[in-house]
Image (cartoon, rainbow, N blue to C red):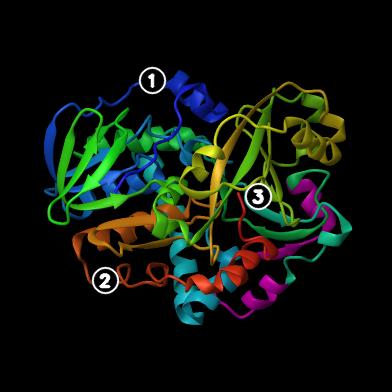
């Protein structure tokens, strides 16, 4: 099995990662030898690091190695919008995929995962600029109005669901002038995503995880034990976890369950004080168009603006083709100026990040069909900051052969590929691919 690594050079940079490295440029060494581990995790983003942390929390004696192609936070974990959310907005998809009881259980578990992320960051002194300011599913044009009502109707009798409708006036207070009402989740938060990834790297190392950066994996060989070959060394492991997010599309079997696209993002220079009210109270916001816009303010007074579902990536290089500079920055700028005309003309810093939409719009976690010792987690569909904590629990159970609530949960079940059209349409129509 061969994997494609992230592209090198400055195209990987985002505002988040550049800022995080200025604050703390401590890095893990590259793998330069042959080592042995009980579990080898490929990918040093949220999913890989949460899996490593979960494994060590369950069993401090287990040996875990993480190999990352570039730096922890170089991929989606350092290039997303920093919306820390649960899966409640995807409740209709959860029910369609796993049934009402399991769907509600997973939604509640994802809400608990958000709390766990916040608590873990506090306990391990991870300064990720976490602000509990909620998430607003809104409209920015009349044809988007009430797009959230089907989901709210489905949640009406479900205990614990935090989403509730707000007026147009309250929406504008929360997320700025573009908002035209919506559904609001006060339990969501925003954060500095690359700072969280770098902090998780440090926490994992403190727990005894061997973390190797600048160690791209070139091949995975064998079925027992498994050999993970990098440019400089080999990890021989009983189990392997592929936590490579969109780059899992380099595997033909996984690619059949994904649609590769991208999100284009930029952050402005700090907003002038007299214009900051235009961006609302700092709430994370997503509109209801098919290719959604999303925005939020940052901890240092900037505005992040992005657009999802831009472009399509094909075959084994799909993720890398969706990663790097924004190719049509003027188009992104026009969407921004229509939403925030009073903020036009500000200097910006931009980047593009790949997004892997799954057929259900939900992440999935399973063993590879041709190697039961290798597990993959992917398919976050643009919303992985919170659910990746849940993914770490699931992958830890799968990798250790545990028989528990995670190893056989609804997110370990795949849809039939022939249902692709229905699933992919669902992830756009219900706005479940939020950032």
> Which residue lies at the image location 13% right of the left edge and 56% below the top edge?
224
- Marks 2,1: beta carbons within 8 A: no
Q: Is residue 161 visible?
A: no
> To which residue does mark 3 refer?
309
> To which residue does mark 2 refer?
404
Give the Cα distance between marks 2 and 3. Answer: 35 Å
- Marks 1,3: beta carbons within 8 A: no
Give the Cα distance between marks 1 and 3. Answer: 32 Å
Q: Is residue 409 visible?
A: yes
Q: In the image, 333: left or right of 57?
A: right
Which sits in the foreground, 193 or 319? 319
Whether the magenta-drawn stretch holds residue 153 is answered as: yes
Question: How busy is the neighbourhood of tag 3: few (under 14 within 10 Å), some, or many (20 plus)?
Answer: many
Q: Secondary structure at mark 2?
A: loop
Vertical order, 235 against 271 (above or below): below
First reached walking from the N terminus: tag 1 or tag 3: 1
Residue 303, image x and y in percent?
69, 33
First reached walking from the N terminus: tag 2 or tag 1: 1
> To which residue does mark 1 refer?
25
Vertical order, 295 against 398 (above or below): above
Q: Secondary structure at mark 1?
A: loop
Span shown in magenta: 150-174
Which sits in the foreground, 42 or 113? 42
């Amino acid at each position: 099995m061969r994997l494609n690594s992230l592209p090198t050079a400055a195209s990987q940079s985002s505002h988040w990662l550049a800022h995080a490295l200025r604050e703390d440029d401590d890095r893990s060494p590259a793998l330069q030898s042959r080592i042995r581990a009980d579990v080898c995790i490929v990918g040093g983003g949220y999913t890989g690091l949460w899996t490593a942390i979960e494994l060590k929390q369950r069993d401090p004696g287990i040996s875990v190695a993480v190999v990352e192609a570039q730096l922890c936070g170089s991929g989606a974990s350092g290039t997303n919008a920093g919306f820390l959310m649960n899966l409640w907005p995807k409740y209709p998809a959860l029910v369609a995929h796993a049934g009402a009881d399991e769907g509600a259980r997973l939604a509640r578990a994802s809400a608990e995962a958000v709390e766990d992320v916040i608590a873990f960051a506090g306990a391990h002194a991870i300064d990720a600029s976490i602000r509990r300011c909620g998430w607003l599913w809104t409209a920015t044009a009349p044809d988007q109005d009430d797009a959230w009502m089907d989901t709210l109707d489905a949640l009406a009798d479900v205990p614990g669901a935090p989403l509730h409708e707000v007026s147009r006036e309250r929406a504008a207070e929360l997320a700025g002038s573009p908002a035209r009402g919506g559904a609001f989740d006060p339990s969501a938060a925003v954060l500095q995503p690359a700072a969280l990834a770098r902090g998780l790297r440090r926490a994992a190392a403190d727990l005894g995880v061997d973390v190797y950066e600048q160690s791209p994996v070139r091949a995975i060989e064998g079925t027992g034990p498994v050999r993970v070959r990098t440019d400089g060394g080999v990890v021989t492991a009983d189990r392997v976890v592929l936590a490579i997010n969109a780059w899992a599309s380099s595997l033909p079997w996984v690619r059949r369950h994904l649609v590769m696209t991208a999100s284009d993002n930029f952050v402005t220079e700090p907003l002038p004080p007299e214009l900051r009210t235009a961006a609302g109270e700092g709430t994370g916001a997503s509109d209801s168009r098919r290719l959604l816009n999303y925005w939020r303010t940052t901890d240092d007074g900037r505005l992040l603006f992005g657009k999802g579902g831009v472009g399509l990536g094909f075959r084994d290089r799909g993720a890398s083709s969706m990663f790097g500079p924004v190719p049509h920055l003027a188009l992104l700028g026009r969407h921004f100026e229509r939403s925030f005309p009073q903020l036009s003309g500000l200097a910006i810093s931009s980047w593009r990040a790949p997004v892997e939409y799954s057929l259900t719009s939900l992440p999935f976690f399973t063993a590879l069909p041709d190697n039961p010792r290798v597990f993959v987690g992917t398919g976050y569909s643009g919303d992985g900051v919170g659910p990746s904590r849940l993914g770490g629990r699931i992958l830890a159970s799968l990798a250790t052969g545990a028989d528990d609530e995670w190893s056989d949960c609804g997110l370990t079940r795949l849809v039939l590929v022939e249902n692709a059209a229905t699933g992919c349409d669902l992830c756009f129509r219900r706005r479940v691919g939020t950032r």
